[in-house]
Image (cartoon, rainbow, N blue to C red):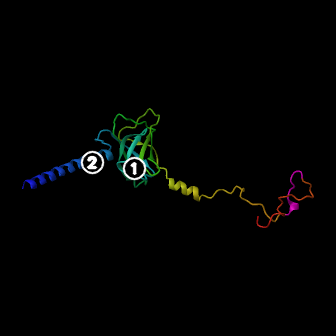
Amino acid sequence: MAVTNRHNLVETLLGFGVLIVAGFFLVYLQNRTHGGLDGAGYSLNARFERVDGLSVGSDVQLAGIKVGTISSLKLDPATFFAQAVIHIANPAIQLPKDSVAQISSEGLLGGRYVSIVPGGSDELIAPGGSINYTQPPFDLVQALGEYIFTKPKDSGEDAKPSTSTKAKNASPKPGLKMDQPAEDSPADLPAGE
């Protein structure tokens, strides 16, 4: 009986240990996805042509430092633009009116985030206001497709000289007499070159 009680006590302590580790993991996950934002700060709106790879909870960075998160993404049915609500965590961070919000990538295969490039205006965006200048993400696949499948303009450099031209119609090379054929004249070349 004493062995069974000791066995139950060990299982109970192990269960509590698992619950404590799970609690720490949940707190870490909450801070990681929401940036530990406690509701302080303010929100700004931004309209993007596209928000490929961006999601609710994505980082908002200023000078490479996380200053907030994306709290909402929705489609505006009237304009077909993506409406993003950006939550800035620190109310002391006030952005100039001509700031730019651009969707950037953490690397070639990394996630997307919003990078804010502050402008130089003396006027500031009020809380609840809008960032008027935005840039959609750069689409590497589309750019490669355009590069690969775009036909180059015909500049005339690719045009081959006609092989049917007679040596007598060819202009002479400097230093040759008119009655001597040029060494590289088209008449001396094999057919098809």
Q: Nearer the viewer, residue 169 or 97?
A: 169
Give me the residue at 47% from left, 50% from top: 108
How many callouts does the rendering have?
2
Looking at the rendered image, the disc whose residue lies closer to the viewer, 2 or 1, is 2
- Checking the image for residue 56, the label placed there is none
- Whole-percent x, y for residue 126 in the image: 37, 37
Q: In this rendering, is residue 159 above or below 126?
A: below
- Near mark 1 (Cα within 10 A), the count class, few <14, some 14-19 or many ≥20, is some
Residue under the image location 58 percent in, 58 percent down: 148
| Predominant SS of the magenta segment | loop
190 and 143: which is toward the camera? 190
Q: Is residue 67 above or below residue 177?
A: above
Quarter of the figure that contains the C terminus: bottom right
Dot 2 amino acid type: Phe
Q: Which residue is mark 1?
A: 83
Q: Position of residue 109 (x, y in %)?
A: 45, 52
SS class of the residue under badge 1? strand
**Res 191 → quadrant:** bottom right
Q: Give the quarter of the figure containing the N terminus.
A: bottom left
Q: Quadrant of residue 102?
A: top left
In magenta stretch: residue 159: no
Report the span colored magenta: 166-175
Type of residue at label 1?
Gln
Q: Depth check: 25 or 87 in front?
A: 25
- Residue 4: x and y in percent read 10, 56
**Precedes in sequence: disc 2 or disc 1:** 2
Q: Nearer the viewer, residue 19 or 134?
A: 19
Residue carrying label 2:
25
